[in-house]
Amino acid sequence: MKTSEKEFFLTTPIYYVNDVPHIGHAYTTIAADVVARYKRIAGYEVFLLTGTDEHGQKVLQAAQALGVPPQEHVDKLHCRFKELWTKLNISNDDFIRTTEERHKFLVQNILQKLFDRKEIYKDSYEGWYCMPDERFWTEKDLVNGSCPECGRKVDRIQEHNYFFKMGQYQNWLKEHIRSNDKFIQPLARRNEVLGFLEKPLGDLCISRPKERLPWGIPLPFDQDYVTYVWFDALINYISAHGSLDDIKKTGFWPANHHLLGKDILTTHAVYWSTMLKAIGLEPALNLFAHGWWTVNGQKISKSVGNVVEPNQLVDQFGVDAIRYFLLREVPFGMDGDFSHKALIGRINSDLANNLGNLLNRTINMIKRYHDKVVPEPTSPNEDANLKNEFRNGIDSVHKLYDDLAYNKILERIWLLVDITNKYIDTNGPWNLVKSEDGKQRLSTVMYNAAECLRSISLLIYPFMPQSANTMMKQLGIETSIEEQGLDSLKTWGGIKPGTVVQPGSQLFPRIEDNEVEKILSAIESSADKNEQESLITKKEGICDQMLIDDFMKIDLRTGKIIEAEKVKKSKKLLKLKVDIGSEVRQVVAGIAECYEPDQLINRTIIIVANLKPVTLMGVESQGMLLAASDNGKIILAGFDSEPDKGIRVR
Ligand code: MSP
């Protein structure tokens, strides 16, 4: 449970690894990244989680079609998401994959607990099954005899399966939604879920027979079945933190926001909340269901061939323009239609004309009138109106974050951009410079304009981190945005007189009319299906590989264990004193279930010597030892013959 109000956990959905990453996926992830960055500079300890959903029928079928084992297939495919997040400057703290051991372990652990508590039972089931969606439907759910979700044909299936007793939590869930206004946002979606809960809530089928679908996490109590993908996937929000006990200790639960698309609200609001209730954890504080992007009014799909490829958008327009556009154009929660023309329009007006010009002319005037040096304001008490506008603007921005009203936040920041532009126009530095009296005023005006730009760059940082850093650099401010923090906006005057500005290139160059056609046709031709396919599927899965230089940064050393004892109240942890030649390190290791302390004395091991110390169960650990974990059995790494202490291992 939250140990203080300063931990902040937010998540994106984990994306189907088979899908082609498109602007819809990028949208949720950028939205989450903006909040994560904002909260970090507001002083929170943030955990931003994203990842990939890697089990299920579709993945298996795709792997079979390529003739590769499904694990190999997902190892390769998940990179497309990882690499895209790097390109989009996403600052995720973890990337979870549902085929990882840590995740499979927790899913099975939860299943076993619920089974032992009789929250899961076996029953025979007959219903209509949609193979692509991997979901059962009742007769009355069907629309014209087809799947109500995707419209495809359904099969009549009768089989034995396992069920989670979801129905028993219906009244609790209704009450929870009713008494927590912000649990589900926007309001219209909250009402939809309440409407859904007016009908009786059945139990949830959480297994699939292995003979029909072998690619999934086996049920720990019946090896003939695997876990239903949704029951598996939702647990990622916890498994990224370790076990159920771990999550309680981290301070990151309940999650502050689960961001998701409107299509997966029921699975989160109903399945996930009731699962958490059964597990004994609180639901997330907020589920925010955003709308869908279409392209020319059509659903984005590989088969329609209208996938807007985010990598290509970034190459063409720059990462910050994309991040800005997606969140500025459409209120979060509503649907929106994507068009390159609208994107170019925003780049030219909001970014190049308004913000870009403001930076450019301010820096140039400080260069011209003050020899690049931010002047001392001669009358620091003047311009109360301007300062008030900023104070109010900053307060409104803080409040708007509570409701994830991204487009309003950006509108509000751009109002400050306009106010600053107007302030410059009204004061006319180009006239002030002409007289001695004017020059007095000029120093105050140029100082204030520079301070306005510092505030604006802090405010745009969550949305456009790269541009915000460039703005700070041009303003000559060396302290990073993270270090300045949002608190530095509480008082006017963060930029120090005497700072030397660094005129640079245009922040957002205008896209001229004669270039627009060229860009649009380049995009059109590369939107050619074959090219898209090659962009997307031929990429090798190399995102988990690292360069030798990175490996060399890890300081592995030999060390001799000179003391060992159990950590109080822990079944797994041992506290070791390890002599690494130059010093003795205290290392806490999770090996107590496989090694007795006495057995370890005088043993030579390998430790990672340059890890930042961490505290485990109240004991500081100044390194990590290397060991193999073979189906739960831990075996320490060692040598054929005894090396000395403190020798580098490569
Ligand atoms: N794997 C599940 C989520 C499991 S979370 C425990 C899934 N994956 S998905 O890849 O199909 O979709 C992930 C997210 O992308 C969803 O929130 C979905 O709404 C979003 N989008 C997919 N296409 C979209 C648009 N065209 N527009 C906006 N978002 C859309 O569902």
Image (cartoon, rainbow, N blue to C red):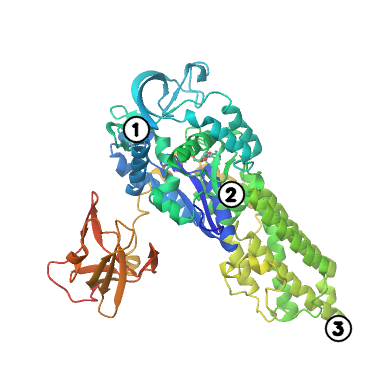
Report whether residue 354 is seen.
Answer: no
> Residue 219 at what x, y percent from top left?
31, 35
Which residue is tagged 1?
A: 61
Mark 3–mark 2 contact, CB under 8 Å? no
> Residue 534 at what x, y percent from top left?
41, 44
Gap between marks 1 and 2, in whole Å? 37 Å
Disc 2 residue type?
Answer: Ile
Quadrant in which the C terminus appears: bottom left
Disc 1 residue type?
Answer: Gln
Using the image, determine if residue 441 lies above or below residue 301. Answer: below
Residue mark closest to the camera, 1 vs 2: 1
Disc 3 residue type?
Answer: Glu
Position of 263 with respect to 385 (left or right) is left
Which residue is tagged 2?
A: 519
Q: Earlier in the sequence, mark 1 or mark 2?
A: 1
Classify mark 1: residues with Cα within 10 Å, few (<14), some (14-19) or many (20+): some
